Amino acid sequence: VSFKDDKSGEAGDGNGKDCDVGFEHPLSDLTLVGGAVKTLPSTFHILLQTISDLMLLLPLGSGVQQAAVSCFSIKFWPSDHAFLHQSQVFSTISKILSRSESDNNGGGTVTGGDSVDNNGARKNTGSGGGGVEHWNDITSLSEISVSSRPSMLASLTDGSTETFWESGDEDRNKTKSVTIKCPQQQGGGGNSIHPKCVSVHVDNGRDIGNKI
């Protein structure tokens, strides 16, 4: 968030007046020419709409949710008012405050309904109808095999979109496959790994003969 310098010295008087009225509008001290003058306000509104949509899904009372709410502590311009009502941010903030008050009255600690499963995935299980999960990458723990060209197997997991695996003559006119085998439960008190998602980057746009 950008702001203008207050040469009168009132901003540094220690009374916290600026904090009460909010941050300066991010576009207030920008001098632009050309088409950016027209497109930047709409881009700014799209960003705020995305933040508003995600606020209810964030862990209740968490630092990231507080940061999201503070994004609306801005001295909005009259031209922003129609967007603010359309974004339903007021309803969203009201729901957050209601949930926080309800949890506090219930005698529980506000933790946002976080839970951690045996895969190390942290997720929000609150009543907001959605959730935010943190998933761990278990590629290095898995055994991967392909139906042909095993020499290109390493290109599947090297983290680069410039390298790739493609089928060869071994499985021509047959089913092409990439098989992922996750590690079994180890002896002792180890937990089994149950993958929830497999992400595959498919990019053969430059392959004219087999373009998807």
Image (cartoon, helix red, strand yellow):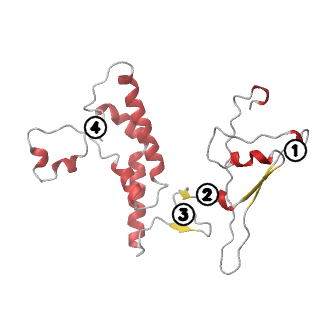
Q: Is 175 left, or right, of 62 in this rendering? A: right
Cβ atoms under marks 4 and 1 closer than 8 Å: no
Task: Compute the Cα span from label 2 to label 3.
Answer: 13 Å
| Secondary structure state at the residue bearing disc 4 | loop
Q: Residue at the location (38% across, 24% down)?
A: 36
Q: Is 185 left, or right, of 149 in this rendering? A: left
Q: Nearer the viewer, residue 118 or 38?
A: 118
Q: Quadrant of residue 170?
A: top right
- Considering only order in the chain, which callout, 1 or 2, is on the residue closer to the N terminus? 2
Quarter containing the C terminus = top right
Task: Tell me the amino acid under the disc marked 4.
Answer: His
Task: Compute the Cα span from label 3 to label 1.
Answer: 37 Å
| Percent position of residue 56, x then y | 47, 54
Task: Tell me the amino acid under the disc marked 2.
Answer: Asp
Q: Is 171 left, or right, of 6 in this rendering? A: right
Q: Residue at the location (74% across, 42% down)?
A: 165
Q: Label 1 belongs to which residue?
A: 175
Q: Marks 4 and 3: which is nearer the front? A: 3
Q: Marks 2 and 3: which is nearer the front? A: 2
